Image (tube, coloured by chain):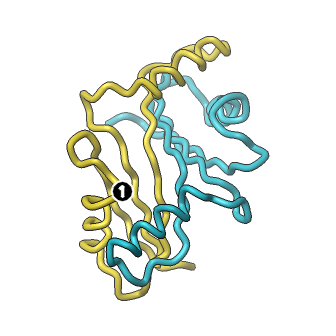
Chain colours: A yellow, B cyan
Amino acid sequence: MKATVHIMLKKGVLDPQGKAIGHALENLGFEDVGDVRQGKVIEIEVGASTTKAQIEDMCDKLLANPVIEDYRVTLEEIA
Amino acid sequence: MKATVHIMLKKGVLDPQGKAIGHALENLGFEDVGDVRQGKVIEIEVGASTTKAQIEDMCDKLLANPVIEDYRVTLEEIA
């Protein structure tokens, strides 16, 4: 199975990397660009018996910083 | 509207960061962990008239490195 973890900074936490991307887009001539936020996505191949709770455990222990980051886990069969 | 851009290294491009995460997960006692790949996700608030082609233009010019990275754009109304 494939687990996909999306990790974004929590709302209200300053995201300087996102801000930099936003400014760069404006400098390149893209208008109408509002707030930009950058996060991480991690794709993990796991065994068929792996549960979502185990992936969330991975997030809490290693992948995300729960103090400043939110994460979202999706688990799907590999086609 | 909210544009979400997923950027992953192309298949076949070595992903040392993903490998490091995989090893760290094994060292933490998680079994059954196969290939791990890390990518980026960028969320951009854009005006209502922005098209998917414009977001793809942003990817080609700034957000992604088309030589080694694949990107996927989704565009949705903000709820």
Q: Residues within 10 Å of mark 1 (few under 14, many from 20)?
A: many
Amino acid beneath label 1? Leu
User: Which residue is label 1 attached to?
Assistant: A63
Residue B63 pos. (x, y %): 63, 34
Q: Give residue B28's quadrant in the image.
A: bottom left
Residue B31 falls in image quadrant: bottom left
Residue under mark 1: which chain is it in?
Answer: A
Residue situated furthest right in the rendering: B67
Across and down, in percent, residue B19 comes to 55, 64
Q: Most extreme residue toward the bottom, as rendered?
A: A49
Q: Quadrant of the N terminus of chain B?
A: top left
Q: Residue at x 32, y 78 (%)?
A: B29
> Residue B39: image x %, image y %?
54, 51
Q: Is residue B30 above or below residue A6?
A: below
Name the foreground residue: B28 vs A55. Answer: B28
Q: Residue drawn 51% across and 77% down?
A: B34
